[in-house]
């Protein structure tokens, strides 16, 4: 493996390493030295280019949010207006495939609620546009839809297993519920 050289290569390697470590161990399960070792750089470079571990996590979360938005746009899913259950199911799959993103997001909100400023992640704007009606109303439904999605990502498979339900059936029911929340009354 070639060592990263230059600012951009180092930053990219550190963000990639951090994302992998979050997915494997959770956001509290590693140190800056672990990030540096995984990225193939000296730990002083992590501090130089990012600052603290919290700063690395924040920038990784922002990069992952941008990647989620890009994936949604590239998938051809609608980014505004009503979202049917099939669209929501695709979004659930897209988010489920990025555990480092939602695990770090949950960690950030739980550890530092004051730092979770609405509208700071690129996904917030995307989902707000998708999950609100044309007049921009429905903030409560949008919030409930977001909480439902995060709840599914965190506890969905566990709850399905614990109750003996089929994961695919539960996921479909979640998609239908979220779709009805964001579409509003018929």
Image (cartoon, rainbow, N blue to C red):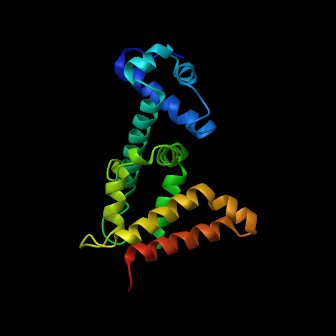
- Residue drawn at the location 47% of the way across and 69% of the way down: 86
Quadrant in which the N terminus appears: top right
Farthest residue, direction left: 135
Examine the image and state in which quarter residue 8 appears.
top left
Front-most of residues 172 and 183 = 183
Examine the image and state in which quarter residue 174 appears.
bottom right
Quadrant in which the C terminus appears: bottom left
Residue 71 position, x and y percent, is 40, 50
Front-most of residues 167 and 73 = 167
- Residue drawn at the location 57% of the way across and 73% of the way down: 173
157 on left or right of 62: right
153 on left or right of 71: right
Instruction: Count all numbered tags in the image, as a single digit.
Output: 0
- Residue drawn at the location 66% of the way across and 65% of the way down: 167
Against 61, residue 153 (above or below) is below
Residue 3, can we see it? no
Residue 71, can we see it? yes
Residue 151 position, x and y percent, is 56, 60
Front-most of residues 25 and 77 = 25
- Residue drawn at the location 42% of the way across and 37% of the way down: 58
Farthest residue, direction bottom: 186
Residue 52 position, x and y percent, is 44, 26
Front-most of residues 50 and 69 = 50
């Amino acid at each position: 493996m070639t060592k990263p050289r230059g600012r951009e290569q180092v930053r990219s390697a550190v963000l990639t390493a951090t994302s992998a470590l979050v997915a494997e161990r959770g956001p509290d399960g590693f140190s800056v030295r672990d990030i540096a070792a995984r990225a193939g750089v000296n730990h002083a470079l992590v501090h130089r280019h990012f600052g603290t571990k919290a700063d690395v996590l924040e920038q990784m979360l922002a990069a992952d949010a941008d990647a989620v938005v890009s994936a949604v746009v590239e998938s051809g899913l609608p980014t505004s207006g009503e979202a049917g259950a099939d669209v929501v199911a695709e979004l659930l799959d897209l988010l489920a495939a990025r555990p480092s993103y939602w695990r770090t997001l949950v960690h950030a909100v739980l550890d530092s609620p004051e730092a979770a400023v609405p509208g700071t992640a690129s996904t917030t704007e995307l989902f707000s546009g998708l999950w609100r009606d044309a007049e921009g109303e429905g903030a409560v439904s949008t919030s409930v839809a977001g909480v439902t999605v995060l709840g599914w990502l965190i506890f969905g498979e566990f709850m399905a297993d614990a109750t003996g339900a089929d994961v695919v059936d539960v996921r479909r029911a979640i998609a239908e519920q979220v779709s009805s929340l964001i579409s509003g009354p018929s």
